[in-house]
Image (cartoon, rainbow, N blue to C red):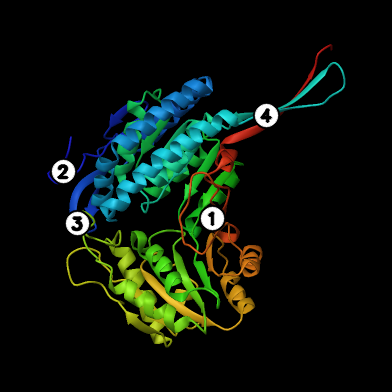
Amino acid sequence: MTTDHGYPAVRMYIAGEWCQGGTGRTAPIVNPATEKVIGDVPLATTADLDRALDAAADGFKVWRATPVAERTRILHAAADLIRERAAEIGRVSTQEQGKPLRESTGEARRTAETLRWHADDARRAYGRIIPSPPGTVLTVRREPIGPVAAFVPWNFPVGGPNRKISSALSAGCSLVIKGSEETPATAMELVRCYADAGLPAGVLNLVFGEPAEVSEHLIKSPVIRLVAFTGSVPVGKLLAARAGEVMKPSLMELGGHAPVIVCADADPVKAARKAAQAKWANAGQVCTSPSRFLVHESIVDEFTAEFVTAAEAVTVGDGLADGTGMGPLANERRLAAMERLIADAVARGAKVLTGGERLDRPGYFFAPTVLTDVPEDARLMSEEPFGPLAPVVPFGDLDEALATANALPYGLAAYGFTDSAATAEKLSDELEAGILSLNHCGGSVHEAPSGGVKDSGYGREGGPEALDAYLITKRVSHLLAP
C-alpha cells in the first residue's frame, strides 16, 4: 500500500507480522526537498515493545539452532532481494532523506554486498582446541551473544540499519531495531527483503517510537544482551551509561570531526577535488565527512581556489531530479545548525568565500560553503557541522597540523594527502582516528573495520571484526575420565 505521494504506508514488523501499533499514535514524515508531509510513522507503545522483546527471545532460540549453512542461504537470498529492489528502495530513501537518487540506489546495492560479506564471514567464526594433558579437552567456542537492541539514525537509511542487522543475524543473534522516525519506510523496505527471503518470525523486529521511551524500555529488558548504537556522542554516552547500569555490553559508532591534512608535497588541485567530492556527499551529513581542512601554507591558495570552484559547480536540488549533485539537508534542525556555526565563525573574523546561506526555495536546501580565516576558537572548528561547511585553515609545520587535528575529543575518521612515503607513515602513526584514508577520502568498505577512538565510540563494524560484538567467547574444559 502507498500514499498519495507514491510513498509506502509505514508499518512496524513484530513477530513476523506487519502492524500499525497498539494505540495508532503516529508522527508525520516530511520530504526534505519539498517540506511536505508524505506519510505517517507509527509509534510503538510499551505493549508493542514487549511483543517485540518476546518475539526476539523466541526468535533467538530458533535462529541460533539453525545451521550456519542455512542461515547463510537465507541471508544471501535477502541480499539478492535488496539488490533486485535497489532502485525502489533508493527512491523511497531519497523521498524521505533527500540525498540524490544515485547515492541512495548505490547505498542499497552496497548494502547487499555488505550482507553477503558478513553472512560468509560467519562461517569462519572459528573457535580453537588448546593442547592439554591426556584425558582433558580444552576448547574455546564462539557463540551468539543473544537478542540485540539496535538504534540507528537517519543519514544512511539503508546502510545504517543493515550494518546492525547483517552483523547480528550473521552471528546467530535476533534483533529488535528501532529505525529512524524520519526515514522509516527505507528501514521497512529493507526488513521486508529479509522477511521475504524466509527469515523465521521473531528473528528480526522493527519498531519506531519516542527515542527516549524506546531506548529505556529495550535496554533495561532482561531479554536484551547487547546494545548497538550509531548516532551522536551525547546520545551514545547516555545509552552506554544505561547499558552499563544493567551490565550489558554496547557497540558505539558515534560522531567525529574529521581533519584533512594536505601536506606541502601534495598536488593541491587533485587534493581539493577529491576532498570536495567527499565533503558534498549526502550534503555533508556523514559521520566520517571531511570537516576541517588543514592545508600547508605554500599551497593553500591553490587548494582553496579549486575547492571554491568545486563547490560552485555543485547542482543543489531535489534528489529525484536528474543532474542533482547535492540534495537538501534532512530537516530544519540542520539548517539552523549551519546558520549558527557560520554566524559564530564570521563574528570571530572568518570569511565566507562561497555559499553561507539557505537557498531561497521550498525545501531544506543549503549552499555548499567554503570559509577561510577561521580562528581556532570558532565553534565550527570544534563542533561537528554535519552539513556542507568546509573551513580551510593554513599550517606551516606538520607537527602543528597534527596537534590541531588531534586536539579534539573525537577520533572517528581522518584524511591526509602527501606524495612522501615517510610522511604517510608519520600521518598513519600519529593521527588519532579509527579510520584513516591517505590520498583519497573514500568511505567505509565491508571488507575492513570502521569505528572510532576517544569520544567517537568503541567497537568495530565491517571486516572480520564486525562479528566480535555479537559473539561471546566460551572456554570449555572437558575432563574425559572424571
Q: Secondary structure at mark 1?
A: helix
- Residue picked out by circle 2: 6
Query: For mark 2, does the 10 Å Cα neighbourhood hold few (<14), some (14 to 19), or many (20 or more) residues?
Result: few
- Residue picked out by circle 3: 322
Q: Which numbered dot is residue 237? A: 1
Residue type for callout 2: Gly
Q: Which numbered dot is residue 127? A: 4
C-alpha distance separating marks 1 and 3: 41 Å
C-alpha distance separating marks 2 and 1: 38 Å
Q: Nearer the viewer, mark 2 or mark 4?
A: 4
Tell me, yes or no, if residue 188 can be seen here.
yes
Q: The N terminus lies in which quarter of the figure? A: top left
C-alpha distance separating marks 2 and 4: 49 Å
C-alpha distance separating marks 2 and 3: 18 Å
Rendered residue at 24%/38% (across/down): 24
Q: Residue furthest right?
A: 133
Residue type for callout 4: Gly
